Amino acid sequence: MVRFFGYSKALQKENKKLKKNIIWIHAVSLGEVQGALPLIEQLYKKDRLCNVVLTVTTKSAWKFMQNYLESEMFADLENFTVEILPLDFPWATERFCKCFNPTVLALVETEIWPNLIYSCKKNQIKVMLINGRLSSRSFHLYKNLRRFFMPVINEIDMVIAQSRNDSVRFIELGYNKKVSVLNNLKFDVSLKKNHVVNGLWFRAQCKKKIVWLALSTRDGEEKEIIDCWRNRFSPEMDEILILVPRHPERFKKALKEAQLAGFSVDTRTKFLRTEGVSSNPCPSILIGDSIGEVQMYLAASDIVLIGGSIKPFGGQNPLEACLQKKVIFFGDYMFNFQEISNGLINESAAIRINRYRDWFAEGSEILKDKNKSKCFGDNAYNFIRKRSGSSTKYADLLLVDQRDINSNF
């Protein structure tokens, strides 16, 4: 009902609790949701009684938030709700906007939906684009359709970009208001103590000296990483490889690749099946088959390869690895996180490689030198910490009287 018609029974029910001055945040997928969480947490730290609605689009983002709602931060909140965003049909977005009548809509990163924006303006809802980002691909797409998108983006009351390059791109698309810049919200990711504790316990169950973690791998990557692991692995090695595919539907495929290669293999779920106690000996390869546990896998590991970066998939967010002071590797294809990856390389906080086998070869040398591995970890941690703080500024902005939104920035 909500996707095609914009009718949300959940929001109508919650609206009786939320009442007025509702802050609406839309983050389409899991990555954007995780980026928006520091802002949402700051909103409730500053004002426990503030009213927030978060909308998402993808199933993975929805499932992640259902689990997250059980966390200490959200468990007892009655003034926070999550809903699926309707498709961008005018009748659906119009009905959805009227359903709970927020004061402001904060779109995260690159969510330029014409009918949604027009419906908000029609209902006198302020529209902000926060943590604004335009990848090279998105920029050229919008630029080719500039005549169509220029009127749409100029209906947005405020654009706040996550970098100078992004701000320039919004202006080149024809946005005729000031584009402000704040650091990427993802720099404000917080360490989840329960995930760290679970990760350290998980590692203890593995009983291995070195844990290699390939995080957010994409289609075809697991096979090549496993082939390199075959050339490296011997039964006497006190090491384990953890593969965590980016998309849940590929968990089984990654498991099959490891089995076909002849390794002893298990999944995170089965390995810890009996009330959190490992019932099997530690395998050579373990498949991370859970959602929303990136920090747990990181806490269990020593050295991390960012998936989707050696092949041209665009990479993945390395900042949670920075937060846990891990030795980080990625390839040349980090174009979805270009400024972050370049900054990490410039500050000796990560290592760039060309081949999967280089991860094992160079990583082994670094791990042999405790001072060198500690230096990479410390540099990574300092990199993220000195750029944090934008979530507080965004929260202050959203909590002021929204009628004066532009004058309060």
Image (cartoon, rainbow, N blue to C red):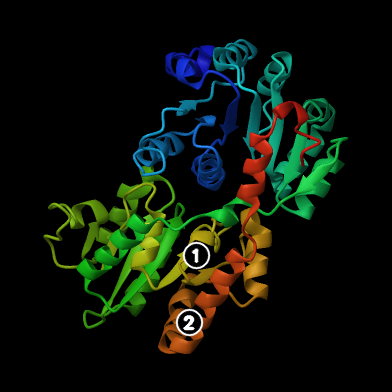
The residue located at (19%, 57%) in the rendering is 271
The residue located at (85%, 42%) in the rendering is 171
Instruction: Tell me residue 348's x, y (percent).
Output: 61, 78
Task: In the rendered view, tell whether residue 78 sits above or below residue 276.
Answer: above
Q: Earlier along the polypeptide chain: callout 1 or callout 2?
A: 1
- Report whether residue 182 is seen: yes
- Report whether residue 351 is seen: no
322 or 355, which is in the foreground? 322
| Element marked by disc 2 | helix
Amino acid under disc 1: Leu
Task: In the rendered view, tell whether residue 77 sits above or below residue 170.
Answer: above
Instruction: Tell me residue 342's x, y (percent).
Output: 67, 67
Q: Which mark is drawn over residue 260?
A: none
Q: Is residue 180 left or right of residue 259?
A: right
Q: Which mark is drawn over residue 323?
A: 1
82 or 165, which is in the foreground? 82
Task: In the rendered view, tell whether residue 192 sits above or below residue 331.
Answer: above
Task: In the rendered view, tell whether residue 88 sits above or below residue 347.
Answer: above
Instruction: Tell me residue 131's x, y (percent).
Output: 67, 45
Q: How far apart, in angstroms, are the residues tagged by discs 1 and 2?
A: 13 Å
Residue linked to disc 2 = 374
| Element marked by disc 1 | helix
302 or 408, which is in the foreground? 408
Amino acid under disc 2: Lys
